[in-house]
Amino acid sequence: MAFYPPSLEKDPTISTDTFFAALARFRDHLLPAPAQAWLKTPRGLWTVFAGVHLFFLIFSAILSLRGEAFSDTVIYRIWADVGFDETKITGPSPWVYPILALIPMAVAHIFGNGPFFFLWVLMISALNFLAVAKLTSWGRKPQAIPAALWWISFTAILGWLGFARVDGFTAPVVLIALSLGVAQPFLVSFILSTATWVKVWPAAIVLALFTVVKQRVRVVLAGVLATALVVVLALSMNSLPKLLDFLLQQGDRGMQLEATFTTPWLWMSVLGLGGSHMYMNQNINSMQVDGPGTELMSVLMQPLLIVAALLVAGLIFWALHTGKRTGGPDRTGLLLLGALALATAFVVFNKVGSPQFMVWLSPAVAVGLTHDWKKWRVPATMLIAIGALTFLIYPLFYDALSHNNPIMAGVLTLRNLLLVVLFIWAVRQLVLTGRETNPTTGSPTKGLLAAEEPNDAQPAAAQVIAPSTVEES
């Protein structure tokens, strides 16, 4: 059995060994050992990947043959069909998104409205393929295959939230970037900065990267380069005045129904208290909740989100420099924990709570699982539960939720509570990482990807626990 320092073997305050031992026994009843072994092979991985993605591709092909689209792609297709001219659009403007989000819409519309949805899903499937290939070194990294299977499973559970929204393009890109680690800060920053111009949330990962790497100037330069290229693109499209509209159009939004901080007003609406009620904001196609104090809370959410992000970044910086004083920090481990903490902060402290935001949380967990299965199985399990509850909310029973159904309000409340717990877990792990010391040397224990540079070797203790092995101690 591999040796683990006490701080990695078992949390002295909270142990989940018993729970995961029971979960492993349940899995063993469902799947015989040969099937589990096959799933951990490259053939098993790519078979599962193909099965999941073929389902979505076939469904999208059927709808496309009927001349239809699905979910938000209906809106995207309309935008592309009128050349993103908001004067010809009734409803949300295409400029609620950063400018690079319009590129996949334009590409999907290259053959007109008919195949739009199929091409959209095909592009996301291709990016998912590249992400899984990078994560597992094209299936040649056996210890990464279970993590890839987890990510595919989470994507499948979320359903169309990962395939019919712009967010589906950013999640695999962020996963690829995090798979590169801290050894190539310029490249990672450039990838993440480019993804930020598709959807804003990868900026959280850029902040985590900036905090943990030595070459912070490279992170900034890559961001500047990506932004300069975007400005050139906007100039070529005669769209420079609209470049920052995606920021300006968010300011007057109210508290969205699914947002974490909306939960008290959600229950006031369900119970008929204080005049709270749900309504559809037609301008941005968003269900919101109005009631006593929601207008003030809506104004406060933006600065609250910024403060939360800065506090988490400060915590990452503290953990980094505490580690420096006592033996050397695990920068990649801090990057992954910081990425999860900041991405979760972007969800928890957001007045917009769209269900597709859950895809933001999966890249850091997937990469974390490849390096320390035992530690990262906790957020991985929470995310599976969050994904399943989100699927119940949207698309299955969203109509009931928006008509004050108390059962669905309970489901949403549980989902939001799990998001808060996930955020607390990530923050707590950052604190523990800052305090962690090696019992023999007094220096911090190196994490499972302690290498700062590409040629550094992993310590012998940094063996990944196979997902079929659950230790009770």
Image (cartoon, grey):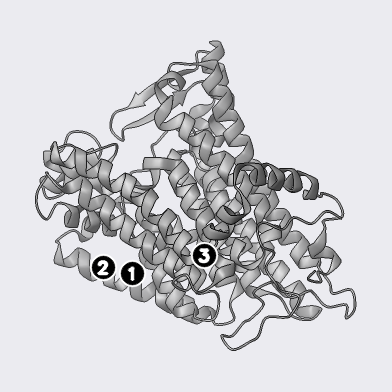
Q: Which residue is mark 3?
A: 41
Q: Which is nearer the N-term, disc 3 or disc 1?
A: 3
Name the mark nearer the viewer: 2 or 3: 3
Q: Which mark is residue 8?
A: none
Circle 2/circle 3 CB separation < 8 Å: no
Q: Determine whether, in the image, residue 117 is placed left or right of residue 292.
A: left
Q: Residue 230 falls in which quadrant of the image?
A: bottom left
- Residue visible at 90% across and 78% down in the picture: 440
Say whether residue 364 is visible: no
Q: Is residue 11 above or below residue 90?
A: below
Q: Is residue 305 above or below residue 126?
A: above
Q: Which is nearer the N-term, disc 2 or disc 3?
A: 3
Report x, y in % for residue 89: 15, 38
Q: Secondary structure at mark 3?
A: loop
Q: Which residue is mark 2?
A: 231
Circle 2/circle 1 CB separation < 8 Å: yes
Q: Secondary structure at mark 1?
A: helix
Q: Which residue is mark 1?
A: 227
Name the mark nearer the viewer: 3 or 1: 3
Which amino acid, mark 2?
Answer: Val
Which amino acid, mark 3?
Answer: Thr
Q: CA distance from mark 2 to mark 3?
A: 45 Å
Report x, y in % for residue 157: 47, 42
Work out whether residue 204 or residue 400 is closer to the camera in this orientation and state it.
400
